[in-house]
Amino acid sequence: MAADAGLKGTGSNPRTFRGNPVLLALFAHPDDEAFRCGGTLALLAQRGVSVHILAFTRGQAGSCGQPPLCTREDLGAVRTAELQCSCQALGLEPPHVLDYEDGGLSEVDPGEGAAIVAAHIRAFCPQILLTWPLHGLSGHPDHIAVSRWALTAFEQARNSGNNALSALYHLAVPDAIARELGLKQLHTLPDHEETVAVDVQRVWDQKLAAIACHRTQMGESPILTAHLLKPGTFLPVCLPLHA
Ligand SMILES: [Zn+2]
């Protein structure tokens, strides 16, 4: 295992952020960035934050679309392009995509996963990490694995004197939003436990444009009808574990 192997995916050259604040978002699959936190990321980018997405897989095990838009063989490349489209729609840096097996992250040596996160922390010098909560929100084993690696790398960075890295945030869906959107089978958060809520109404169209990039994954997401929510509804909510 080589820690720097994590930097070999597609994406921009490290250290291109020219002094802007940096957020590094750690995900398992193309589309993780759009459905849950696309609005928050777009708002941050608008305010001058360099937002880097690291996806550990190309989503090769996902749906090819209904009807199929590509062969299963091509799905990884198609979904990588969808992620690039989504990042562009949200105003983010080009994404960094690794070639781990979709659905296989729980089998990866946790030390290797954490080392890859650590390598990206060294490369991009983020102030903030954002990832899935430790239960993965949907419970997806890939999300859980990435969340654990992020926490390990965060703690190691802080313990080794990286004081520039100030917080690790977890995506969260509070009970009230889950009820309103009819989101089921998620590990939701009791409303009183939410700590940061971001009103993304202003960038809602950008979020929908990012979601639309993921043509193979569109399906029936309740997010697509979320404009029916009353104005002022806060979506999504992030939970800082360590700040
Ligand atoms: Zn995912």
Image (tube, helix red, strand yellow):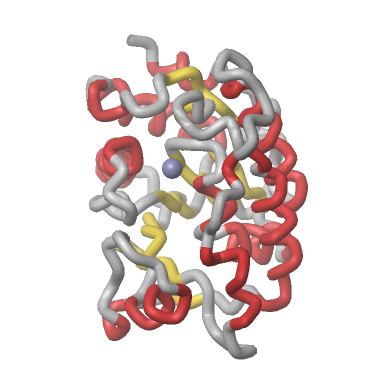
Residue appearing at x 64%, y 36% in the figure: 67
Q: Position of residue 219 (x, y in %)?
A: 56, 50
Q: Is residue 241 visible?
A: yes
Classify the position of the C terminus by image quarter. bottom left
Picture residue at 69% right of the left edge, 70% below the top: 204
* Between 177 and 238, the one nearer to me in the picture: 177
Q: Quadrant of residue 168?
A: bottom left
**Ligand 1 image-quadrant field:** top left
Work out which residue is located at the far top of the displayed protein and give it.
Answer: 1
Q: Point out the image quarter for the N terminus.
A: top left
Please state which of residues 61 and 69 is positioned toward the viewer in this rendering: 69
Asked if residue 18 can be seen in this view, the reply is no
Q: Position of residue 38 (x, y in %)?
A: 60, 58
| 112 horizontally vs 86: left or right | left
Residue 18's x, y, as percent? 72, 43
- Label tally: 0
Q: Is residue 98 above or below residue 162?
A: above
- Who is closer to the viewer here, 172 or 78? 78
- The residue lying furthest to the front in this view is 67
Q: Residue sitting at 40 percent across and 67 percent down?
A: 183
Rendered position, 174 above or below 211: below
Left or right, 79 with reference to 151: right
